[in-house]
Amino acid sequence: MKKYSTILSVIALTGLFTSCSTANKTTKNTEITTTQQKEYPFQTYAKVPLTTDISHLNNNEKEILRLMFKAADIMDDLFWQQAYGPKIDLMDETKGETKEYAKINYGPWDRLNNEAPFVNGVGQKPLGATFYPTDMTKNEFEKNSDLKDGKSPYSIIRRNRESKLYSIPYHDVFKNQLKQAADYLNQAAKLAEDNGLKNYLQLRANALLTDDFYKSDLAWMDMKNSNLDMVIGPIENYEDQLFGYKTSYSAYILVKDVEWSNKLAKFVQYLPELQRNLPVNATYKKEVPGTDSDLNAYDVVYYAGDCNAGGKTIAINLPNDERVQLEKGTRRLQLKNAMKAKFDKILMPIAEVLIDESQQKNVKFDAFFSNVMFHEVAHGLGIKNTVNGKGSVRDALKEANSALEEGKADILGLYMVNQLLNKEELNGQQEDYFVTFLAGILRSVRFGASSAHGQANMIAFNYFAEKGAFEKTATGRYKVNAVKMEQAMNGLSELILTLQGNGDYDGVKQLYADKGILHSELQKDLDKLKTKNIPVDVVFEQGPQMLGL
């Protein structure tokens, strides 16, 4: 196991964002001036050098990494176009700290502050980003039932000269850049000595040019032994807050930690049993999760595009294609170096401020690692298709699906941890995992309601509070009641799985309205974290130069 103290030096950005400059240029006939820092505090991120030891890689593998970096940079530019538009427009119109913050947010909207604009004059961020015409209403889209590929995850909606809606596939919109990215992947495939990596890179290159990712997803599931990995393409649908149909371009470049991966492999065998034991009516757990899933630990060396915007992912559960999930399961990749950075520099300082002193000893990295890991595993549990003929859960719940799915993964992940503790397959005490889970909620609610993860954690926090899973002590800190927390865990699991299985769109929206709210008492506690200068998330110092390439 690598020594993180030498790999990760996390430095708070106390001096990077200290004030906001102003610019008098105009873009699209809109005057752009920056806001004052008192409205949008920029000391939100800790800076993390993102690196790992690659001395065990051979020359071919190092060259593959260089090609992966080039392909990832193209994904980064494509996401800029999806989230905002041409990056150069905003870069030309901003400077100093504001420009740096725009780079972190991939646009002029603060992703960790409910998408609030930090550049005057730009207005609120369109819910549909650039996936749809900004003047298009949800009703107009839904009335166009004959719109070809309108709901496709890989199409952009535009208007023709008669103002009628039509769709364009991603592989046509971004044809030239996707061809270049595919060329890089094919070059990397020629160098790959591992057959699994070679096959995946070749199929993924073709998928970028056709928007048909099924075969490459299957190949990625079969890639078991490579030292290197790359997740690339249009993957998550969080950026589409209008319907949740459209996916965004991302790339992760990963180096496998073989020692930790071997430790995790044994847990996959328990998935069918855990599915059968879910605390919900049998109707909602009939589906059988694939058992070809695997758990692996990686050091991430590059984030690009969607996954690099605002709050950073510390674990991956893919593919999202339900056909692949039912056939082969998913792969769960734990990004160990990024996870350790967040634990050391964000979670522990939060616990020292908000968790009762008697339980601070229960906040442990192994518990945090397991909670995050089983969050990803839990995406594969539960139900993918509604029980009442409404189609897939994703289609039935539309834009309301993302936050509920993240909430399901949070709570079922904790349920899985509890089950494995009972089977003595995990080390530690129940209280370690429960207290660390609560500290994790307090970390994630700071992401804001515009984040699916933030909203999911807000719902869990309010549900747990109502059920007495924790109390506020006389010192103003949180103390977990393990017995009541276990009961609340089961109750929230049942509620979410039932909403998903019923495809109950209205019920989910009501859950958000009732419990996806940041109440004033919690806001006061989060304000304490600001006064302590505890960062909300991390921003990476990354690239081939960090690996000595």
Image (cartoon, rainbow, N blue to C red):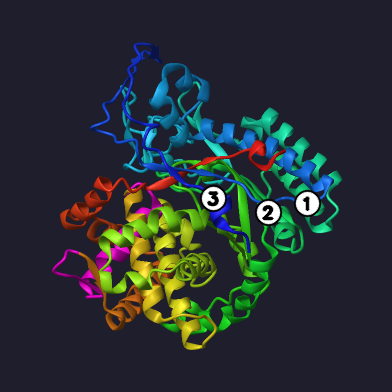
Residue 476 image position (x, y, % from top left)? 17, 63
Question: Is 397 in front, or is 147?
Answer: 397
| Residue 255: assigned label | 2
Residue 200, x across and y down, in percent: 76, 53
Q: Which is nearer the N-term, disc 3 or disc 1?
A: 3
Q: Mark 2, mark 1: which one is toward the viewer?
A: 1
State which mark lies toward you, 3 or 1. Answer: 3
Q: Is the residue under label 1 in contact with that under label 2 (CB below 8 Å)?
A: yes
In this rendering, the answer to whether 508 lies above or below 241 is: below
Amino acid beneath label 2 = Val
- Which SS class for mark 1? loop
Label annotation for residue 8: 3
* Residue closest to the eye, 491 or 473: 473
Location of residue 374 with respect to 205 vertically, above or below? below
Residue 57 numbered tag: 1
Q: CA distance from mark 2 to mark 1?
A: 9 Å
